[in-house]
Amino acid sequence: MNDPRRPHGATDSASRARPGAFGRRRPRTGTEPVTAQSPLGLRLVLSAVFLPLFLAGAAYFGVWAADADPGDGPGRGGLVVLAVVCAALALPALAALMVVLRR
């Protein structure tokens, strides 16, 4: 029997008894790159949206912390923490954007 989904001479090296990470239900056919959907577009959109948002948040909270007086509602320490968190979240967004643009 000639199975058109399997390349000539291919053997089933993965066990079909265990599905999931340790085995495959079906052998690889060689068409996976054609039928696979890439998450790069979504990563590009999310990075392009959240990188400026996090940078603007870091700048906003940083300026607010600089102008805060000792008796103001949110204290200077909390605003600095928010600015640092926004800046820290901007770094993975920048890294994801650089990876997507490189590919």
Image (cartoon, grey):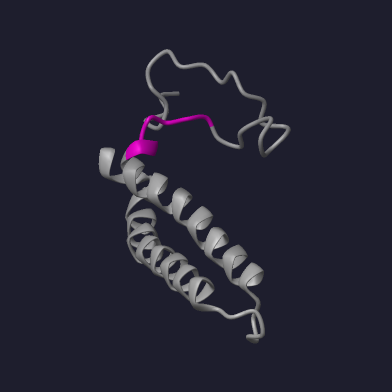
Percent from the top left, x then y, of residue 41?
32, 55
Q: Nearer the viewer, residue 55 or 72?
A: 72
Please provide percent x and percent y for residue 52.
35, 64
Image location (x, y in percent) of residue 57: 45, 70
Decide: is 66 above or below 27: below
Instruction: Looking at the picture, tell me which residue is in the foreground, 4 or 29.
Output: 29
SS majority, magenta: loop
Q: For this view, does 45 lie left or right of residue 93?
A: left
Magenta stretch: residue 60 in it?
no
Residue 59 position by quadrant: bottom left
Is residue 62 visible in the rendered image? The answer is yes
Q: Which residues are magenta?
A: 27-33
Judging depth in this view, the residue of 21 and 44 nearest the camera is 44
> Who's the residue at 55% across and 59% down the image?
84
In-image side of 21 versus 102 (left or right): right
Residue 5 lies in what quarter of the image?
top left
Q: Residue furthest right?
A: 18
Residue at 46 percent across and 17 percent down: it is 10
